[in-house]
Amino acid sequence: MTFRASHLLGIEHLAPDEITAVLDLADTYVALNRSDAKHSDALAGLTQINMFFESSTRTQASFELAGKRLGADVMSMQMQASSIRKGETLIDTALTLNAMRPDLLVVRHPHSGAVDLLAQKVNCAVLNAGDGRHEHPTQALLDALTIRRAKGRLHRLTVAICGDIAHSRVARSNILLLGKMEARIRLVGPPTLMPAGIADWGVEVTDDMAKGLAGADVVMMLRLQRERMDGAFIPSEREYYHRFGLDARKLAHAAPDAIVMHPGPMNRGVEIDGTLADDINRSVIQEQVEMGVAVRMAAMDLLARNLQAARAA
Ligand code: ASP
């Protein structure tokens, strides 16, 4: 089987053929999700627990729906209201849940590396739904599926990733995935929002939107992640929008058929013009949400098959 992983902790650990395997299976789930009977028994009898230690709207809903459409028993824990409040450590919580014999654990945590640590303590498949500024693998996979369906391929595309790169796990996972699939990546943003060591990432970097977007096939905007900023990274939101906010004028530098993406939640009028975000001829933001459910179904299906094979061995 092409997909060999036992957890989905990051794109870093996936080989290109494993990424393709997820996207191919996800395509079949897009078709299922567009039919009237949106149901399969791929995860029947299995238990999926969602543990979100950081707030989430679309990712948590997407994982929950994905599990339900595949017939799993799905439980979503409200971690803010849980024993963590009473001082229980992440590991103790994980061990307690592990004793309830889940098959799939979906975890979002504010600390980079927390999900990897947890995966070492449990005997089920763990999916990272975002850990600090480290990785958000299902976001990169759903973005890749959206791009592949719009452009017919991933390799040799020019992708401009714009805005707050420094605080973004979405950017990190996308850079890793697109790099593995041989796309050309340009990072565009103010130097204060570029991560340290960016020169070694093998990507082009610029603080000029006109240059960064020139001829790009895909323009991916990122949210200004104020909750991860502990100082003044930008002079003002007005100034930021003027230089880095995507509007029709800046988009005109990209290829005429360039698509516009945003992982959500969006700050309209800060990193993107609201009218452009809603323009169905350019923006694929709603498709990204749709692809999210299908990609999560595919990832959980493949992980569950590997888990069951390992248990039977
Ligand atoms: N929803 C994405 C994440 O959880 C992007 C964002 O929050 O800006 O990382």
Image (cartoon, rainbow, N blue to C red):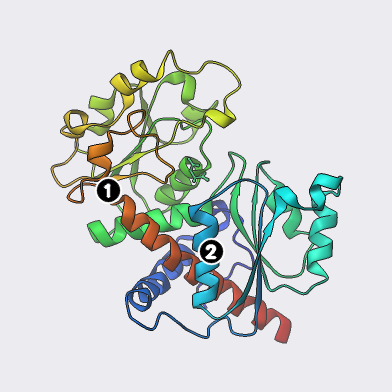
Q: Is 192 situated left or right of 122 in this image?
A: left
From the viewer's perspective, is residue 134 above or below residue 60? above
Q: Report which quarter residue 153 is drawn in.
A: bottom left
Marking on residue 157: 1
Residue 175 x/y as whole percent: 44, 44
The front one of 14 and 105 is 105
User: Can residue 154 be seen at all in this image of the molecule?
Assistant: no
* Number of the label disc, if any, that sits on residue 63: 2
Outermost residue toward the top in this view: 235
Q: Residue at the location (40% across, 39% down)?
A: 266
Q: Does the residue labelled 1 lie within 8 Å of ligand 1?
A: no
- Above or below, 255 against 181 in this view is above
What whole-number distance in Å separates the C-alpha atoms at marks 1 and 2?
Answer: 29 Å
Q: Rate crowding at label 1 as few (under 14), some (14 to 19) or many (20 or more) other CA atoms within 10 Å.
A: some
Q: Position of residue 307 (x, y in %)?
A: 66, 76
Whether residue 256 sits left or right of residue 115 in the image: it is: left
SS class, disc 1: loop
Mark 1 belongs to which amino acid? Leu
Quarter holding residue 8: bottom right
Q: What element carries label 2?
A: helix
- Residue 263 appears in the rendering: yes
159 is higher (above) or lower (below) than 43: above
